[in-house]
Image: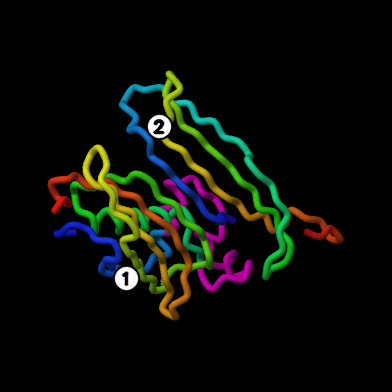
Amino acid sequence: MNTPAVVGDVCPPRRYTHSRVQLFRFSAVSWNSHRIHYDAEFAASEGFSDVVVQSTLHGQTLTRYALEWAGSDACLESVSWRNVATAVAGEPLTWNATVRAVAPCDSGVRVTLDVSMVRDDGAPCVTGHVDLTCRAARTSP
Amino acid sequence: MHGGQAVRLSRAPIAGTRVTASRAVTSAERKHGRSGDFVLLGFSTRFTSPDGTELTAVDETIVVLDALTKGTSA
């Protein structure tokens, strides 16, 4: 974000895909032993086309792209999301965000983003919000 | 499976701080959806410093598909 955020601004979308190895590693570091996240055969027996992206990885990705958009002066205040549909390894996903609110706060400007993860067919997997604080020097007019 | 989550970072913990995590079930509701009956559990976790100051708050929902026995409707 090189200019002050304005309500209604649409952030550049981020397109990405989670690999099986990435999901395995995320399960390991988050102590998530559910087999649908690292055992493709088991995931298939549960009706999934591949290993399933962890909800908490969705949350981490929502946050990471929001912080990358906001720049190095931004701090995360809160993040919330709702899982609407399942995403699996190898599936192309797109991070979308729109500035919902901009308000001054003690440490600068607080920016709230409406965020979502969307499949190629346009169906959302995850919807949520990210609240960031940006230092005034970068975001004030 | 995970229904959703909200994480609030209230205050940054400082190295050496003893952190206490308190976890509680805040709700349990029977629901009916496209895949049938299920139970929606709400959990709240609070991470606090020794003086009781909240550092981080996490609220989450868990969908339990196998919680209801046959013949039990939501």
Q: Secondary structure at mark 2?
A: strand
Where residue A89 sits in the image (x, y, percent)?
44, 68
What is the quadrant of residue A68 in the picture? bottom left
Q: Secondary structure at mark 1?
A: strand
Q: Which chain is mark 1 on?
A: A
Query: Which residue is drawn at the image coordinates 33% and 69% (left, top)?
Result: A16
Q: Amino acid at mark 1?
A: Arg
Q: Residues within 10 Å of mark 1 (few under 14, many from 20)?
A: some
Q: Which residue is mark 2?
A: B55
Residue toward you, A51 or B47: B47
Where residue B22 sits in the image (x, y, percent)?
54, 31
Q: Which residue is mark 1?
A: A15
Q: Are marks 1 and 2 on the same chain?
A: no
How many discs mark residues in the rendered view?
Answer: 2
Query: Which residue is drawn at the image coordinates 43% and 30% (left, top)?
Result: B54
- Horizontal side, residue B31 vs residue A35: left or right: right
CA separation in Å, label 1 and label 2: 33 Å
Q: Which chain is mark 2 on?
A: B
Please, which residue is most extreme toward the bottom here? A121
Where residue A121 sits in the image (x, y, percent)?
44, 80
Residue toward you, B45 or A108: A108
Q: Give the magenta-colored segment's residue range.
A: A23-50
Please, which residue is most extreme toward the right here? B71
Q: Is residue A25 magenta?
A: yes
Q: Is residue A128 magenta?
A: no
Viewer-side label of 1, 2:
2
Where residue A141 sits in the image (x, y, percent)?
13, 54
